Amino acid sequence: GLRCKREVWRVQVTLAKLRNAARELLTLDVDDPRRIIDGDAILRRCTRLGLLDEDKQALDYVLGLKINEFMERRLQTVVFKLGLARSIHHARVLIKQRHIRVGKQIVNTPSFMVRTDSQKHIDFAMNSPLGGGR
């Protein structure tokens, strides 16, 4: 369902930066204020994106993240998993043709990272004929 390898590489770079930040923070002392503040920020971001569960709130779990977990949070994959599209490829076409909205906003980027709180608001656009358009 990807257009080219660049989409995979972009996710790899994001994951590498996240893991490097976590690795650097793990070298600091447990009581270090930078480790506490930055570590909480990384964990909060990963939890909000749905990469980490609520029970896995430690920097060690950030080091264990894989590319597949990022790919599962893309709008293209989520639209397919919700059953709005017949296949991953169909999901990409629907998104690019502006049939999908997240909340009230139409999103036409298949690589859009879906947050856990906005996942329940993914639906067909109001003016889309697929969503009973008006």
Image (spheres, rainbow, N blue to C red):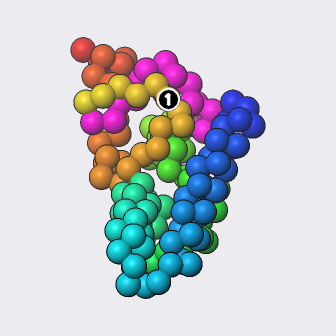
Which residue is drawn at the image coordinates 56% and 30% (left, top)?
92
Which residue is drawn at the image coordinates 52% and 22% (left, top)?
96
**Residue 21, relative to residue 55: is it above or below?**
above
Residue 123 is inside the magenta segment: no
Residue nearer the viewer, 108 or 22 = 22
Residue nearer the viewer, 127 or 64 = 64
Which residue is most to the bottom? Answer: 30
Task: Give how far across and how far down residue 102 sits, in percent.
Answer: 33, 36
Residue bounds of the magenta highlight:
87-103
**Residue 115, relative to residue 37: is it above or below?**
above
**Residue on which the image places disc 1:** 109
Q: Is residue 36 visible?
A: no
Quadrant (top left, top right, bottom left, bottom right) of the C terminus: top left
Which residue is drawn at the image coordinates 42% and 54% (left, top)?
49
User: Viewed as shown, does residue 6 lie left or right of 71?
Assistant: right
**Residue 32, relative to residue 7: is it above or below?**
below
Q: Amino acid at mark 1?
A: Thr
Task: Give how far across and how far down residue 71 sits, in percent.
Answer: 59, 50
How many residues crowd mark 1 within 10 Å: few (<14), some (14–19), many (20+)? some
Q: Secondary structure at mark 1?
A: loop
Q: Is residue 61 visible?
A: yes
User: Viewed as shown, does residue 60 lie left or right of 117?
Assistant: right
User: Viewed as shown, does residue 67 lie left or right of 27?
Assistant: right
